[in-house]
Amino acid sequence: MSEKIRKAGRHVTQSEALIFETSAAGKHAYSLPPLDVPGVEAAKTLGTEQVRREIEGFPEVSEIEIIRHFTRLSTWNYGVDTGMYPLGSCTMKYNARVNEVVARLEGLATEHPCQPDELSQGCLKILRLLERCLREITGMDAVTLQPAAGAHGELTGVLIIRAYQESKGDPREVILVPDSAHGTNPATAATAGYRVENIKSNRAGRMDLGSLRERMTERVAGLMITNPNTLGIFETDILEIAEVVHHRGGLVYMDGANMNALVGVARPGDFGMDIIHLNLHKTFSTPHGGGGPGAGPVAVKKFLEPFLPVPVLEERPGGTLRWNAERPQSIGRVRAFGGNFGVLVRALAYILANGPDGLLATTRDAVLNANYMRKQLEGAYELPYQSPSLHECVFSDKKQARHGVTTMDIAKRLIDYGFHPYTVAFPLIVQGALMIEPTESESQEELELFIEAMRAIAAEAETEPELVKTAPHTTRVKRLDEVTANRKPILRWKPAPTPEAAD
Amino acid sequence: MRYLPKSERIRKEMLATLGVPSMEELFGCIPEKARQKGPLNLPRALSEPEILEYFQERAAENSGGMLRLLGAGVYNHFRPVLVDALLSRGEFFTAYTPYQAEIAQGTLQSIFEFQTLMCQLTEQEVANASMYDGSTALPESVAMALRITGRRRVLVGRSVHPEYRQVLGTYTRRQDVEVVELPVGRDGRLHREALRGALNDKTAAVAVQSPNFFGCLEEIPAIAEQAHRHGALLIGVINEGVSLGIVRPPAEADIVAMEGQSFGLPLSYGGPWVGVIASKEKFVRSLPGRLCGQTTDRQGRRGFVLTLATREQHIRRAKATSNICTNQALCALAATIFLCVYGKEGLRKLAEQNLAKAHYLAGELGKLGGVRLPFGAAFFNEFVVRLDADAASVQQRLREKGIIGGVNLTKWYPELKNSLLLCATETAKRADLDRFVAAFKEAMGARD
Amino acid sequence: MHPKEYRYTKEHEWIKADGATGTVGITHYAQEKLGDIVFVELPAVGRKLEAMESFGSVESVKAVSDLYSPVAGEVTEVNSSLKDNPALVNQDPHGGAWLVKVKIANPKELDQLLTADAYQKFIESEAAEQ
């Protein structure tokens, strides 16, 4: 191992089969109390045709095997707890442990969504306070906490645009999306029945105002914009952008994926945005969980409140809270029950732990880290856009590509140095993009190690490109064959065919 | 702020390296007019004990101490302690989507195991890495059926969870799709004659839930046959996964849309839970959501990757066909651990206990005057009672005795007057059930 | 590299006319740009296509590309061997990995397509832009 690699070393990583392969008839981990009511015969009660035979291939394992199985699997992962996880636009920040504790409290985790509102006032107060906090942070007037994820929030937001435009007599046909947008933006607009038109970015890496003016006609229902955009650059023309769209009767939807750059510094509601979704699993520190769950609340201006999904939380005279589903102009229900409550609890715990000063300090540290990292890496990697960065910075692999080394190779080599890779090959407008978001959770020491690693890889790309192109070298598995995984997909385990039973 | 790993001195040093005089200057690119004026008007920062106290106080304002026999798509099952013990490993819960397979094999292998378990449970051939929840799995399944058949008409039983149907309405309302709701028959199941009348060669899919919203088991094979005769697909919806321990899976369905909350996820006042879509191998390219596949590395070692990604939003962009972006990996992991704990034998025993408890409760309630079980169809752990009294008043009286008396169905089914949906899982003790029945008798007796 | 007797589109399809029948595929340049092809989606036989109408797609691990018909016509045959062996598109794009055969509605449309030379110039200019 190279002495340049200061952060990581080799450690024991145990092999582990699939749980089905460790299964053997008769082993078990469950325990049930004795049945205290008369047993019923399933075939009689349900009818023989409704009773299933045994579940073929289902695991039979003991408790210690389960503990070891999943513990070993966990050691094959890399999390924020392990180290810097600079995945751009994902805001991989520290997930405070107290959030986990409060989400699991008896009286919160145990509450049933169908119990009467009067017996759920504690849950409703939590939601109410979170709504209030998010309204204040975004500068908006009303919030729905229902959407289960960012993309789900986007869909909710675009359905609100549609309902609003319909209320004006015409849903219109087009949603404008900048070419730097997350793929979910055009996908969402299309799912909501709109045609998508792209707005080009200019040389500064911002939306081209002229191009917007040209495209913004009466056919356009709205604009979806990410601010700061996926290059980590603030759209300095944002007030003009909003004006152009509003002037033609359109709405501006802001993708709040990058709110970690703005909390406490600027509020979308103050710079002309009509709708915004927040990713609580990014900005508000709820754990990503290996891909979910998240929550994607949507905040809107007052005039859009009637269109929010049902149910909405209302305060009755006397202060009790209740759900109201009787809302004639609502876009409808976007998921069953009130939302990912457990995620919402964690987000509120994060906001309460920070308070206004902590949230501002967080935003500042996030931007400080990104700019520090940018400054230290600027020589080693090509910086395609010179505009100032906020919470993240996008480089390109242009210098390394001369040696045949791509952004993917650099990302894989970072693993050897003990870091999770950045976001690879996004945004699409940068050829060979390295999208790096350190977040506020990194100390200067960890940042320095990262910078050192990135510089070392840039040097390796020149001197030993093969080393980088074949990385990672220290992981359990080397680069995996994705082509075969796609051509001949194996999507589930199956028992090995049993040889003919010998008599 | 305790979550921030920097001292003021280090901040100053870093700023000096940047040649930026102050933190405010870092935000110089934001126009003055777009900046926030003054500090956020939020509660002051709380210490850890204060945070705990705040949430403990809220927790005490809920249904604490009440006896609840509620189901309606959300089931109170015991959660083995292993679930949280393992979920709490930071390598699982602080990781992101496994884009970089080499350092995400833990998440990937567990997803592969989850997909396998879901196939085994539902007797389908492929299952995705999970959906937001069951209610969004339904419209995504419908969209899948529309793509596969190229047809635009969908039939949905009114015995499907009412909120699922509402979500379906939201997803389809602004698209050119005809959604027809089918009535419930006298036995509490899908009205088969109505289905026959509504099915035609323009029908893309029939969506049926079993056990249905009233707890009744539908005749999946016969309904599948009816649908298939017209070239329509059958979407089997499942709310209560534990039923699959004993109830025949919807093997004849072409698509299964399931909520996996029963598998070790807390009620948590509505989520987060885990949706699943399972289907036939031939439809895999139309399946929404993430998929994990097995492959090998350069040295021939087994490993797992996200695969068939070209179906997904971030690649399809404006041509995307679904709203799901990532999955509910941690919830899927909870379900995976739960199912490993119960295993082949345990899940059956667990289902048997649910069956026994619900039938005991139904039997005891059925003995009371003025209480009928209106539906004749077989049920799993949930059932409807119809009262000769005002159901809302009975619920009110029960509440005075510390009991939440089921879900009043009038809200969703105006035609089902004075009807309550009750559920008894393995967590209901006989003493609780007896107390419930006694209180119910009293509440009924007090009717005017 | 790109056969002289074929005609080409700016979307990187080729067509080889044989009387009223046109055989359509994607070019060597296109398969190289896409990388390992993992899936090919083709239309049903009998489908009527407009010129430059999308009739299917080819997929690599991380990209989907639409396929466009160089001319109007009816699909008379599809290359079913690609279903199990999409890699053929990488190995033999101008031959064995043809995608569909169409009954050409209007042979004059062929004249509007690029010649091999014009296509070569087009891809060079495209490469220069990047």
Image (tube, rainbow, N blue to C red):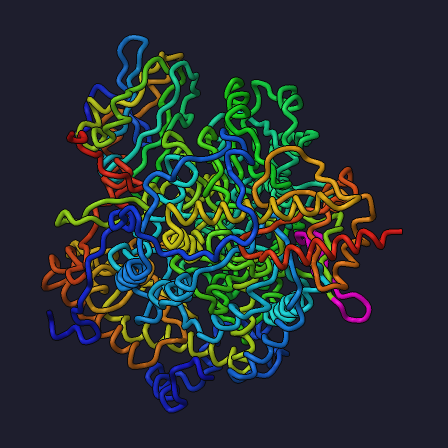
Front residue of C125 and A381: A381
Q: Quadrant of residue B442?
A: bottom right
Residue A200 vs B378, above or below: the answer is below
Residue at image location 56% in from the left, 83% down from the top: B50
Q: Is residue B356 magenta?
A: no
Q: Is residue A316 magenta?
A: yes
Spot occupied by residue A359 in the image (x, y as percentages of width and height) = 52, 77
Residue A222 seen in this snapshot: no
Up/down of B1 relative to A308, above or below: below
Determine whether, in the image, residue C112 is placed left or right of residue A195: left
Residue for point 14% across, 65% down: A460
Decide which of B386, A460 is in the foreground and name it: B386
Residue A268 placement: quadrant = bottom right
Q: How many marks?
A: 0
Q: Residue at x 35, y 84 (%)?
A: B14
- Indicate the position of residue B360 as horizontal and vertical percent values: 61, 47
Kindly give the residue lying farthest to the bottom in the view shown: B9
Q: Is residue A149 left or right of residue A500?
A: right
**The C terminus of chain A lies in which quarter of the figure?**
top left
Placement of B144 over or under A8, stated as above or below: above
User: Is A67 displayed left or right of A418 in the figure?
Assistant: right
Residue range (magenta):
A302-320
> Which x, y percent locates residue A242?
60, 59
Position in image of residue A155 (x %, y %): 56, 49
Relative side of C23 to B406, left or right: left
Q: Residue furthest right?
A: B448
Quarter the N terminus of chain A occupies: bottom left
* Residue C119 showing in the rendered view: yes
Residue A192 or A337: which is nearer the viewer?
A337
Question: What residue appears at the point 43 percent right and 52 percent down from the top-left corner?
Answer: B326
